[in-house]
Amino acid sequence: MASTVIGAGITIEGEVSSEDDVVVQGTIRGKLHGKDRVTVEQGAVVEADVTSGPLTVAGTITGNIHSHDRVDLQAGAKVVGNVKATRITIADGAQFKGNVDMDV
């Protein structure tokens, strides 16, 4: 399956919507909607509400998260916002401030 990649030097302001997997290496401000897997890599900044399938975070998200599957916060991840998902894992070294709702 193809991936939509937002490269390290790119900043997008507005709404990003993709039918494919999304890999964020740069910055998004606004809204992010990925129908499938969304990956926020280390060094990436997302200042947006995120709707996705499985979500893996190694970078920073400021905004609410709604995953139709699972959310994995890796070591070094920083999330400020509420998370709604069926499952969530928070690795040692990840930072999270917000509420979790697992009643999806």
Image (cartoon, rainbow, N blue to C red):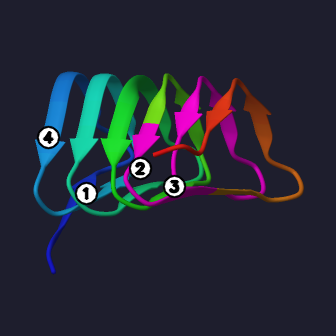
Q: Earlier in the sequence, mark 1 or mark 4?
A: 1
Q: Is 79 a magenta residue? A: yes
Q: Nearer the viewer, residue 66 or 32?
A: 66
Task: Examine the rendering and report whether any part of residue 72 can be seen.
Answer: no
Label 2 sits on a secondary structure element that is loop
Image-quadrant location for residue 26 = top left
Alpha-carbon distance for marks 1 and 4?
Answer: 12 Å
Q: Nearer the viewer, residue 23 or 67?
A: 67
**Kind of residue sitting beneath label 3:** Glu
Q: Which residue is mark 2?
A: 25
Label 1 sits on a secondary structure element that is strand
Kindly check if marks 1 and 3 are in contact, taking CB atoms under 8 A apart as contact: no
Magenta span covers which residues?
66-87
Q: Is residue 83 left or right of residue 55?
A: right
Residue 53, image x, y percentages: 34, 58
Task: Examine the rendering and report whether any part of residue 30 can be seen.
Answer: yes
**Kind of residue sitting beneath label 4:** Ser
Q: Which residue is mark 4?
A: 17
Kindly check if marks 2 and 3 are in contact, taking CB atoms under 8 A apart as contact: yes
Q: Which residue is mark 1?
A: 5
Q: Earlier in the sequence, mark 1 or mark 2?
A: 1
Residue at 39%, 23% in the rendered image: 48
Alpha-carbon distance for marks 1 and 2?
Answer: 7 Å
Q: Which residue is mark 3?
A: 41
